[in-house]
Amino acid sequence: MIVASTSTVHGSAYLEYLLPALENFFRDVKTITFIPYARPGGITHDRYTEIAAKGLASLGKKVVGLHTFDDPVEGLNNAEAVFTGGGNTFLLVHALYKTGVMPVLRERVFDGLPYLGSSAGSNITGLSMQTTNDMPIIYPPSFKTLGALPFNINPHYLDPVKGSTHMGETRETRIKEFHQLNAIPVVGLREGSWLEVKGEVITLGGTLTARVFLQGKEPFEIETGSELHLE
Amino acid sequence: MIVASTSTVHGSAYLEYLLPALENFFRDVKTITFIPYARPGGITHDRYTEIAAKGLASLGKKVVGLHTFDDPVEGLNNAEAVFTGGGNTFLLVHALYKTGVMPVLRERVFDGLPYLGSSAGSNITGLSMQTTNDMPIIYPPSFKTLGALPFNINPHYLDPVKGSTHMGETRETRIKEFHQLNAIPVVGLREGSWLEVKGEVITLGGTLTARVFLQGKEPFEIETGSELHLE
């Protein structure tokens, strides 16, 4: 898996910063199945799939939207590789359960299906979607997600803004509140960072450090290029 | 009701900016029942009730935590006035359903019980909690809330930051995504603003304008001191 904080870094095109890593990652794949359910800004599934196809165009792969299959579960079962785009995590998780895709995607990812996620698509690789930053615009049947990582992701991780006068909670405070009720570790991925997951080995990619939150402990940073060991 | 964006504005003490309005609002009340379930930063119910009591001390009222009653529903039924503090809206709504307080609070508010909410405590006065900014740290049985307002509240409303390089969604984008799926109007209350609700009349308090979002329309501002008419 490649689990990216964001699809786009400021000042560059959609997926552009990830293309060198993706070229290698998708090298044995002809077709990438795109899951457009998170619908950022409410755009259509078709439009979102077009954007994904354009972003991946330089790789020379065919990109097919999962929504174009009469039976999305069958579409997924025949997929060579999957990319789940960002948007609203509640909407994404709701759709994955409603279509019956969630358990099948879990099975296929555990069987080694190449999986790329960005933002909401990365959120769902963790044990639950409970460290999303998104608004609960729809009520999903569960907050449980793929559990393909032994922790949760907080994408678009933001450090506290020094001198801010805003009284809303910082990201770190929100994750601390999560840890009052849940023991699941959380990895805060800053924009431009991603995790590369090969079997049990998880490596931090990109140029930045990532912030790790364990229940009842002080958060700490991990260096890019290093393997994650959370125990 | 007084429905406040935040308990605290930058550079002033807890509830301080609201005290002039609260003095009048609670003038006929001896005891205020405090609902501490949202537990900001995971503090205890006792500690949170102490903070609320201190914030309200200058009003000369007794403040009692709803958690101190063996039967919170009975505690609520005997309440003269209620203040629900901020924190995590998912946790608050989960607790209100688990304790059976939600339907009783709805009934009592509709019967005219003086109700003060801040942040999460304001969120729940709307039709649903779906325009909260909080992290889904616990799975509530429903997103439906008191419905004591014919719209939803987005507390701590933040305008887009000009020149920001962060790629996460702005507040306005999130509310737009909400409106892709829901017709409920949303009032974005900036920190320092509150709504004063007397029967059918809803007036904006504080020094700032508030931003109103209607499905499929351009958002607009309403002036402080003016009545809300959303149709």
Image (spheres, coloured by chain):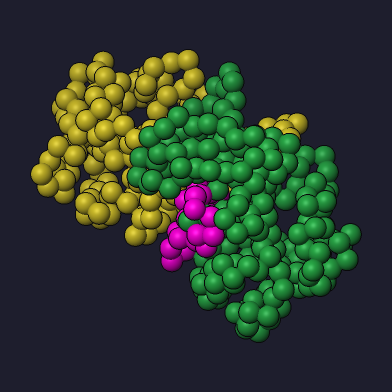
Chain colours: A green, B yellow
Q: Residue at x 68, y 65 (%)?
A: A114
The residue lying toward the viewer, choosing from B60 and A120, is A120
The residue lying toward the viewer, choosing from B82 and A164, is A164
Q: Residue at x 50, y 42 (%)?
A: A230
Q: Residue at x 25, y 27 (%)?
A: B47
Q: In this view of the protein, can residue B136 be seen by the observer?
A: yes
The residue lying toward the viewer, choosing from A205 and B163, is A205
In the image, residue B35 lies in the stretch drawn in magenta = no
Q: Up-down: is A43 above or below A102? A: above
Q: Up-down: is A108 above or below B194? A: below
Examine the residues drawn in magenta and state their main secondary structure.
loop
Specify whether B119 is left or right of B48: right
Q: Residue at x 40, y 28 (%)?
A: B7
Q: Position of residue A13 (x, y in %)?
A: 83, 48
Residue range highlighted in magenta: A128-152
The residue lying toward the viewer, choosing from A16 and B72, is A16
Q: Quadrant of the N terminus of chain B?
A: top left
Q: Position of residue A35 (x, y in %)?
A: 67, 67
Q: In this view of the protein, can residue A129 be seen by the observer?
A: no
